[in-house]
Amino acid sequence: MLSPERLRERLLLSPGMTVLEIGVGGGYYARPLAALVRSFIALDLQAEMLKRLLHKAGEAHLLPVRASAGELPLATSSIDVVIAVTVIGELPSAPRAIDEIRRILRKGGMFSVSEHWPDPDFVPFARMRELCHQGGLQFEALHGGRFNYTATFRA
Protein backbone atom coordinates (compact mmCIF):
# COMPACT_ATOMS: atom_id res chain seq x y z
CA MET A 1 0.00 0.00 0.00
CA LEU A 2 1.19 3.49 -0.86
CA SER A 3 2.03 5.55 2.22
CA PRO A 4 1.20 9.26 2.50
CA GLU A 5 4.95 9.94 2.74
CA ARG A 6 5.68 8.10 -0.50
CA LEU A 7 2.82 9.87 -2.27
CA ARG A 8 4.08 13.23 -1.00
CA GLU A 9 7.52 12.51 -2.50
CA ARG A 10 5.92 11.77 -5.85
CA LEU A 11 3.74 14.91 -5.89
CA LEU A 12 6.26 17.70 -5.24
CA LEU A 13 3.67 19.90 -3.56
CA SER A 14 4.36 23.53 -2.67
CA PRO A 15 2.70 25.97 -0.23
CA GLY A 16 0.88 28.05 -2.87
CA MET A 17 -0.95 25.14 -4.51
CA THR A 18 -4.62 24.28 -4.61
CA VAL A 19 -5.08 20.50 -4.49
CA LEU A 20 -8.13 18.30 -5.03
CA GLU A 21 -8.32 14.71 -3.87
CA ILE A 22 -11.07 12.67 -5.52
CA GLY A 23 -12.51 9.90 -3.34
CA VAL A 24 -10.93 11.23 -0.17
CA GLY A 25 -12.68 8.76 2.14
CA GLY A 26 -11.49 9.15 5.71
CA GLY A 27 -8.52 11.29 4.68
CA TYR A 28 -5.60 8.86 4.83
CA TYR A 29 -3.73 10.99 2.28
CA ALA A 30 -5.55 14.31 2.70
CA ARG A 31 -4.77 14.86 6.37
CA PRO A 32 -0.97 14.80 6.07
CA LEU A 33 -0.87 16.48 2.64
CA ALA A 34 -3.21 19.39 3.45
CA ALA A 35 -0.62 21.08 5.67
CA LEU A 36 1.76 21.36 2.70
CA VAL A 37 -0.49 23.45 0.43
CA ARG A 38 -2.60 26.63 0.45
CA SER A 39 -5.91 24.87 -0.13
CA PHE A 40 -6.90 21.20 -0.06
CA ILE A 41 -10.31 20.24 -1.43
CA ALA A 42 -11.47 16.85 -0.16
CA LEU A 43 -14.09 15.41 -2.53
CA ASP A 44 -16.23 12.38 -1.87
CA LEU A 45 -19.70 11.30 -2.95
CA GLN A 46 -20.51 9.88 0.48
CA ALA A 47 -21.50 12.37 3.20
CA GLU A 48 -20.52 9.88 5.92
CA MET A 49 -16.94 9.75 4.61
CA LEU A 50 -16.68 13.54 4.71
CA LYS A 51 -18.01 13.60 8.28
CA ARG A 52 -15.41 11.02 9.25
CA LEU A 53 -12.71 13.05 7.54
CA LEU A 54 -13.63 16.24 9.39
CA HIS A 55 -13.78 14.38 12.70
CA LYS A 56 -10.20 13.17 12.16
CA ALA A 57 -8.86 16.31 10.46
CA GLY A 58 -7.71 18.17 13.56
CA GLU A 59 -5.81 21.28 12.49
CA ALA A 60 -5.63 20.37 8.81
CA HIS A 61 -7.22 22.97 6.53
CA LEU A 62 -9.50 20.81 4.44
CA LEU A 63 -12.48 21.95 2.41
CA PRO A 64 -14.93 19.03 2.21
CA VAL A 65 -17.03 18.84 -0.97
CA ARG A 66 -19.73 16.26 -1.60
CA ALA A 67 -19.89 15.67 -5.34
CA SER A 68 -19.30 13.23 -8.16
CA ALA A 69 -16.00 13.11 -10.02
CA GLY A 70 -18.03 13.21 -13.22
CA GLU A 71 -19.53 16.61 -12.32
CA LEU A 72 -16.93 18.56 -10.39
CA PRO A 73 -18.40 21.75 -8.85
CA LEU A 74 -15.17 23.67 -9.39
CA ALA A 75 -14.20 26.48 -11.73
CA THR A 76 -12.38 25.79 -14.96
CA SER A 77 -8.57 26.05 -14.62
CA SER A 78 -8.73 26.45 -10.83
CA ILE A 79 -6.72 23.47 -9.52
CA ASP A 80 -2.96 22.83 -9.51
CA VAL A 81 -2.97 19.14 -8.57
CA VAL A 82 -5.64 16.43 -8.66
CA ILE A 83 -5.01 13.24 -6.70
CA ALA A 84 -6.89 9.97 -7.19
CA VAL A 85 -5.75 6.91 -5.24
CA THR A 86 -7.49 3.63 -6.15
CA VAL A 87 -10.65 5.45 -7.17
CA ILE A 88 -10.80 5.75 -10.99
CA GLY A 89 -11.90 2.13 -11.43
CA GLU A 90 -14.84 2.68 -9.08
CA LEU A 91 -16.33 5.56 -11.07
CA PRO A 92 -19.40 5.05 -13.27
CA SER A 93 -17.60 6.82 -16.15
CA ALA A 94 -13.83 7.14 -15.96
CA PRO A 95 -13.69 9.05 -19.29
CA ARG A 96 -16.17 11.63 -17.98
CA ALA A 97 -14.14 12.05 -14.79
CA ILE A 98 -10.91 12.50 -16.78
CA ASP A 99 -12.64 15.18 -18.90
CA GLU A 100 -13.68 16.98 -15.72
CA ILE A 101 -10.19 16.69 -14.25
CA ARG A 102 -8.74 18.21 -17.42
CA ARG A 103 -11.29 21.04 -17.29
CA ILE A 104 -10.46 22.08 -13.72
CA LEU A 105 -6.67 21.75 -13.98
CA ARG A 106 -4.69 24.90 -14.62
CA LYS A 107 -2.41 24.87 -17.66
CA GLY A 108 0.50 22.65 -16.69
CA GLY A 109 -1.45 21.28 -13.72
CA MET A 110 -0.83 17.73 -12.56
CA PHE A 111 -3.09 14.71 -12.31
CA SER A 112 -1.59 12.05 -10.04
CA VAL A 113 -3.27 8.66 -10.14
CA SER A 114 -2.24 5.69 -8.02
CA GLU A 115 -3.43 2.11 -8.35
CA HIS A 116 -2.64 -0.92 -6.19
CA TRP A 117 -3.26 -4.59 -6.87
CA PRO A 118 -5.29 -6.51 -5.58
CA ASP A 119 -7.89 -3.72 -5.50
CA PRO A 120 -10.91 -5.28 -7.26
CA ASP A 121 -11.30 -2.07 -9.31
CA PHE A 122 -7.60 -1.93 -10.26
CA VAL A 123 -6.93 -0.03 -13.51
CA PRO A 124 -3.78 -1.24 -15.31
CA PHE A 125 -1.34 1.50 -16.27
CA ALA A 126 -1.80 0.97 -20.02
CA ARG A 127 -5.55 1.58 -19.66
CA MET A 128 -4.99 4.61 -17.41
CA ARG A 129 -2.55 6.09 -19.89
CA GLU A 130 -5.06 5.57 -22.71
CA LEU A 131 -7.89 7.20 -20.71
CA CYS A 132 -5.75 10.22 -19.86
CA HIS A 133 -4.47 10.59 -23.42
CA GLN A 134 -8.03 10.50 -24.76
CA GLY A 135 -8.97 13.13 -22.15
CA GLY A 136 -6.24 15.51 -23.28
CA LEU A 137 -3.70 14.86 -20.52
CA GLN A 138 -0.02 14.28 -21.32
CA PHE A 139 1.91 11.47 -19.65
CA GLU A 140 4.84 12.70 -17.55
CA ALA A 141 6.12 10.01 -15.18
CA LEU A 142 5.55 6.56 -13.78
CA HIS A 143 6.64 5.44 -10.31
CA GLY A 144 6.39 1.88 -9.07
CA GLY A 145 5.66 -1.23 -11.06
CA ARG A 146 2.96 -3.16 -12.82
CA PHE A 147 0.82 -3.87 -9.75
CA ASN A 148 1.48 -0.79 -7.65
CA TYR A 149 2.01 2.48 -9.47
CA THR A 150 1.63 6.23 -9.38
CA ALA A 151 1.35 7.90 -12.77
CA THR A 152 1.61 11.62 -13.37
CA PHE A 153 -0.10 13.43 -16.22
CA ARG A 154 -0.10 17.13 -17.15
CA ALA A 155 -2.80 19.38 -18.52
Image: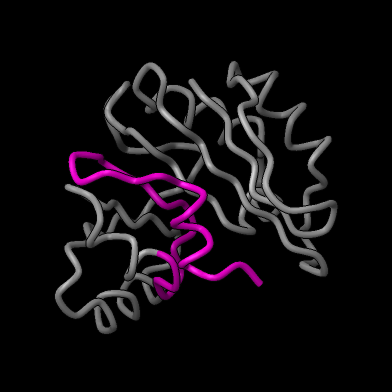
Q: Is residue 147 above or below residue 47?
A: above
Q: How many marks are shown on the rendered structure?
A: 0
Q: Nearer the viewer, residue 111 or 96?
A: 111
Place of residue 124 in the rendered image (x, y in percent of width and height, measured from the top left):
82, 46
Kindly identify the residue that appears in the image at 75 percent across and 59 percent down: 148
Place of residue 9 in the rendered image (x, y in percent of width and height, measured from the top left):
47, 54
User: Is 15 within the magenta?
Assistant: yes
Q: In this view, does 78 lie above or below 93?
A: above
Kindly identify the residue that appears in the image at 48 percent across and 29 percent down: 100
Q: Is residue 29 above or below residue 153?
A: below
Kindly identify the residue that appears in the image at 51 percent across and 49 percent down: 10
Coloring scheme of the render?
A: one colour
Q: Nearer the viewer, residue 96 or 77?
A: 77
Place of residue 120 in the rendered image (x, y in percent of width and height, measured from the top left):
81, 66
Q: Quadrant of residue 73?
A: top left
Left or right: residue 141 compared with residue 117: left
Left or right: residue 29 compared with residue 35: right
Viewport quadrant of the N terminus: bottom right
Place of residue 89 in the rendered image (x, y in percent of width and height, measured from the top left):
71, 51
Kindly identify the residue that appears in the image at 48 percent across and 20 percent down: 155
Q: Quadrant of residue 125?
A: top right
Q: Magenta part of the protein: which range?
A: 1-29
Q: Quadrant of residue 54?
A: bottom left
